[in-house]
Image: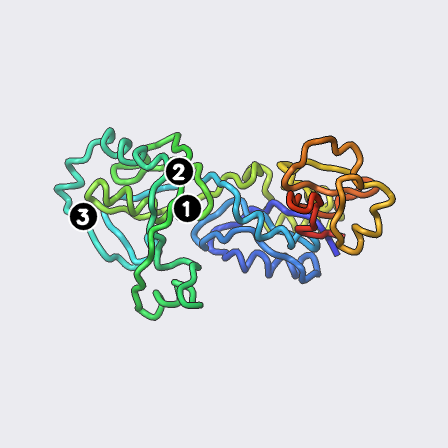
Amino acid sequence: MIDGILNVYKEQDFTSFDVVAKLRGILKQKKIGHTGTLDPMAEGVLLVCLGKATKLVDLLTEGDKCYRATMKLGYETDTEDVTGEKTAESNTAVMAQLTQMEIEAAIMSFVGKYNQIPPMYSAIKKDGKKLYEYARAGIEIKREARQVEIYRICDITRESADTYSFDVYCSKGTYIRSLCRDIGRKLSCFAVLSGLLRKEVHGFSVTDALTLQEIEECQINGCLQEAILPVDALLQQYPAYEITEQAENFLKNGNKLSPRFFKNLGEKRDLRIRVYYAGEFTALYDYKEEEQVYKPFKMFL
C-alpha cells in the first residue's frame, strides 16, 4: 500500500469523488481520501491522501486556500454559479451605469471577516441531511450565516463588460460562489461564479499538480513515487522530536509519553508535536498540561 499525499490537478466536470474513484483504479488500493471538495465546474489543486495519510484528511480540510475566481454580473442562479437555473436578473439600466471603479471597490470591500450565508447547493448538513439534497427536492432551508475571512483579493482583471476575474486568499469554509453572489447584491446587479481555479492549498501550488492521466503514466513508467509527498509533508507547522529507545514500546502501544522520553526536548512544551523513532514519522502527540505528559492525537505506525 502507498502511504503519502498526491497533489492532484482536478479537471473540470470531475467531482472530487470521481478523482478518488479513478485513483483507486490506477493505484490498485482502496485507502484513499481527498482533503476538500471541489465542485465539478471547478478545477485545480486537490490534495489526496493515500494509505496512512488518510488519517490527516480532517486536519487538511481546515487549511487556508487561494482561488482564481471569475464572476459574471447581471443575474443569479439557484446554484450561485453558471450551471444553475436563473432565479433573478438585473435591470440593464442598472448594469449600464456601473463603472469599473465601482465594481472593483465592491469586490475589495469583502476583504476581512464577514458573515456569509452558505449556498443551498452545498454539503453542509441540516438534521442529518446535506443541503444539496433538500435543494434537489425543491426545498429551501434557512441557513445561518457563518463568519469567514477573506485575507486578500488581488489581480482584479476585467475580462469583458460584465465579467471580472480576481485572486481570493481565504479561510476554510468560504464559498467563492456565495462571495460572488454577495458582491453582485452589493452592486444591486446580481452575479454568479462563472469559473474557479484552486491555485493553492497548504502552500502546495497548482503548478506542481498532476492530472489523472499524468499520474497514470507515472504509475505505468514506475516513477510515481517521486510525485508522492511523505505523510508528514503537510505537518511542518508542528515541531519534530525523536523519542529514545526506552520509549519505543510505549509509542507502539499508543501510550502517553513523559517529556523525559524525548531527545533534546528542552524546557518548552509545544502543544502539538511530530514524533519520530529511528528517523521515521510515527505520530502526532498533544501536550496535557494537567498531567505534564504527551498524549497521542494521531498514530501513523
- Of helix, strand and loop, which one carries label 2? strand
Examine the rendered structure and indicate whether residue 155 appears above or below residue 132.
above
- Rendering coords of residue 168 (x, y %): 41, 37
Q: Which mark is residue 150?
A: 2
- Rendering coords of residue 64 (x, y %): 50, 41
Q: Which mark is residue 90?
A: 3
Q: Which mark is residue 174?
A: 1
Q: Amino acid at mark 3?
A: Ser
| Disc 3 packing (10 Å; few <14; some 14–19; many ≥20) | some
Colouring chosen for the image of the structure = rainbow
Q: Is residue 183 left or right of residue 261?
A: left
| Disc 1 packing (10 Å; few <14; some 14–19; many ≥20) | many
- Give the Cα distance between marks 2 and 3: 26 Å
- Give the Cα distance between marks 1 and 2: 8 Å
Give whichever of discs 1 and 2 has the lower sequence position: 2
Query: 219 or 206, which lies in front?
Result: 206
- Rendering coords of residue 250 (x, y %): 81, 51
- Of helix, strand and loop, which one carries label 3? loop
Q: Amino acid at mark 1?
A: Thr
- Of helix, strand and loop, which one carries label 1? loop
Q: Is residue 50 left or right of residue 150?
A: right
Q: Amino acid at mark 2?
A: Ile
Residue at 49%, 41% in the rendered image: 65
Q: Quadrant of the N terminus?
A: bottom right
